Image (cartoon, grey):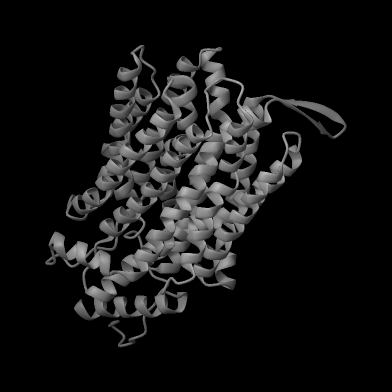
Amino acid sequence: MNKSGDKRINLERPRLSFKEKAGFSLGDMASNLYFQTFILFLPIFYTDVFGIPAAAMGTMMLVTRIWDAVNDPVMGMIADRTQTRWGKFRPYVLSFSIPLAVMGVLTFTTPDFGNTGKLVYAYATYMLLMMIYTAINVPYSALMGVITPNSMERTEVSSFRFVAAFGGQVIVGAATLGLVDYFGGGDETLGWQLTMVVYGILAVALLFGTFYLTKERVAPKKEKRNPVRHDLKDLFMNKPWLFIGIATIFQLTYIVMRGSSTTYYFRYFVGDQQLALLGLNVDLTYTLFTSSFITAGTIATLAGAILTKKFNRLLDKKFVYSGFLISSSFFSCIFIFLQPDNIMLMYTLNIFVSFFFGSVSVLQWAIYTDAADFGEWKFGRRATALIMAASLFALKLGLTFGGAITGWMLEFHNFVPLAEQSEDTILGIRLLMSIYPAIFGFMGGAIMLYYPLRDVTMIKIEEELLARKENEE
């Protein structure tokens, strides 16, 4: 209760400064330097540069990413039980930044081993890279749930986060292939290695910024130490988390399949093209075409992310998430009808696909933090890191299935690296850019129509949680 005796709860407290919101967002920019590289370029790096067969690459994605996904809940429980003078979650962001940069370089290094040796090296380096990525991103994701108790404020923080994330995506989409060409001078193996050196240095600087510019404010009662079995039981009884978790698997499978297929689509189906623009003929090479296509989509995604708050004022979070994911998937399907010279249609459709996906990405994490609040309200125990870790588990399952299915479908359609492809292979690449991933997007959007928490419900939950805390003081 307030000292004045007024029992009304002020849901606007505490307001975060612009500096702290921006500082928090730097961490996702750093993460996306790697995450977007995994989605967009890792498959084609492994098949066309490293020399791993498409089916073996798909299976490797499945095995290593399932192992990585299993680590997420473990890391969440470790982080929830961490106590330092810097907080629970921020120390991990700082401590693992340099190891992340080192392993990123090693993963994109191509040793002169035999086929078996290369596959073993790829498994080992990628698995270690993803374990370090988990050690940063589970605590980082949980950090958003403890810098403020206010759900609407967290939605705004999520918008900042994804503006920065898409900034990282712009860097990866626009610069990566150009950097590979610049540093490699025709040697892609050297180009990829040096490009990851640049990204590693930038990521370390950004993660240091997140550590120094943020503060943890929300914590469970000090006398409360939740047994692991209670946390896990609460997680699987948390109905809102189950819905958004399942939807995330389909959502990520959708976007990873589209992203991973983009480089194959332009290298093997579209090829070099000439675009008439403002009365001039512009030559679009594979590098320029792919980079500009990804960048245009990223800018559209950023626009969608920025406008999320306005959409959320008009519609409930779950309806924005569901409707926009379904809309994105619909425009993806139209790619199956395009021909190599339909350049402007490719850009236009990609803008629609990406714009609608922008709000989905923002709302996903805001909904997860709502699920954490629901868990505390329902069960009387708060396990923010476990909720976010389990959410990353779902995300990585989608990443796993998206990467694995891409590799398997390439093999199914008889893909041969760096060769002229058959009609069946070209059809498979076109389907991977359109209908195959859209199936998963439609399923994710449909599931969220049944998500049980509405925004008005969250306001009541916040009021009760704040009232409980004030009564305990």
Q: Quadrant of residue 366?
A: bottom left
Residue at 43% x, 60% y is 247
Viewed as shown, does residue 94 lie left or right of 304? left
Q: Position of residue 271 (x, y in %)?
A: 67, 27
Q: In the rendered view, tell whether residue 162 sits above or below residue 115.
A: below
Give x and y (percent) for residue 171: 54, 35
At 48% from the left and 59% from the top, the residue drawn is: 444
Instruction: Tell me residue 86's x, y (percent).
Output: 23, 49
Quadrant in the rendering for residue 442: bottom right
143 relative to 426 in the view: left or right:
left
Left/right of residue 135 with respect to residue 415 in the rendered view: left
Q: Is residue 65 visible?
A: yes
Residue drawn at the location 21% of the way across and 62% of the way down: 232
Q: Quadrant of the C terminus?
A: bottom left
Considering only vertical position in the picture, is 7 above or below 265?
below
In the image, residue 444 above or below residue 411 = below
Expressed as whole percent of the image width and height from the top left, the position of residue 323 reads 57, 65
Residue 159 visible, this angle: no
> Which residue is outermost to the right?
279
